[in-house]
Amino acid sequence: MINNNLVLLGLGSRTTTYYLSVLNDLYNKENGEYSTCPLVVFNVDFNDVNSLLPNTSETLDRLVEGYLRDMESFKPNAIIIPNITLHETVDRLHNDSEVLHPLHLTVSKLKQNNWGKIVLFGSLYSMRSDYISSYFKANTIEVISLSEDDMAFIDTVRKEVYKGTETATLVEKFHKLIARYAAKYPVVLGCTELSVLNPKNNEHIMDMAQVQMETAIGSMR
């Protein structure tokens, strides 16, 4: 039996496909030729999860705990959960598994870059709740507030990407908004759907999903 080093929790089709594409690309760049990332996709019905998000609950705890137990049965070096909000539940479980936590990894990277103030682009829940901002604050990183209009637009972009209905005009407007904020402060993308539209040409953008995946590939060396 092949020892699978990485397990990816399969959730929404768009984000799962995105993760698979980027992980394969990163692995190929590191290993060359026709190499593709050896991993297990543990696919679940995202509707079971999404219907309970963004709030934490005992029902969601039990669901995620079951997923983690099943993924751990593969004895992976690393587990990727491609949903930032879902890590709030992972935190509640005090799980000792090899989950690559995007918040922990991002804070470490922010400190390496000496970025003490950032702007967060995420779901409306993530941008308004204390979950991400309080963790950054505890690590001496200040989150600059966005306007209500900008937060509403970012959340609209997230929903359109999830449905696969984003237009070129919407993407262009989103990229301009990122560029406007990134001209003053580093922008952290804290939502997988937004990562799909990451322009990837701005050094003042840090993508939680990208950090997560780069760490995953590094764990396979």
Image (spheres, rainbow, N blue to C red):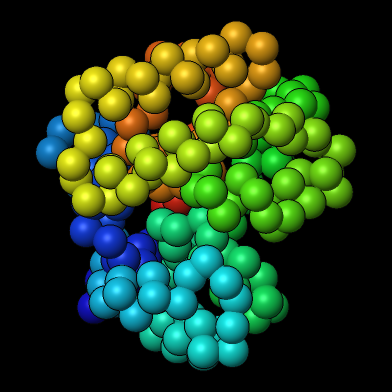
Quadrant position of the N terminus in the picture? bottom left
Describe residue 216's horizontal placement relative to residue 44 as left or right: right
- The residue sitting at 49% across, 14% down in the picture is 179
In the image, residue 35 lies at what x, y percent? 19, 42
Quarter assignment of residue 91: bottom right
In the image, residue 174 lies at what x, y percent? 39, 24
Above or below — where is 133 with respect to 93? above
Describe residue 70's horizontal placement relative to residue 88 as left or right: left
- The residue sitting at 49% across, 39% down in the picture is 152
Foreground residue among 113 and 127: 127
- Confirm whether residue 77 shows in the render: no
- The residue sitting at 45% across, 86% down in the picture is 63
Query: How many circles with numbers are drawn on the protein?
Result: 0
Quarter assignment of residue 9: bottom left
- Report the residue that reaches farthest toward the left: 34
- Report the residue that reaches farthest toward the top: 183
In the image, residue 161 lies at what x, y percent? 28, 43
Foreground residue among 157 and 206: 157
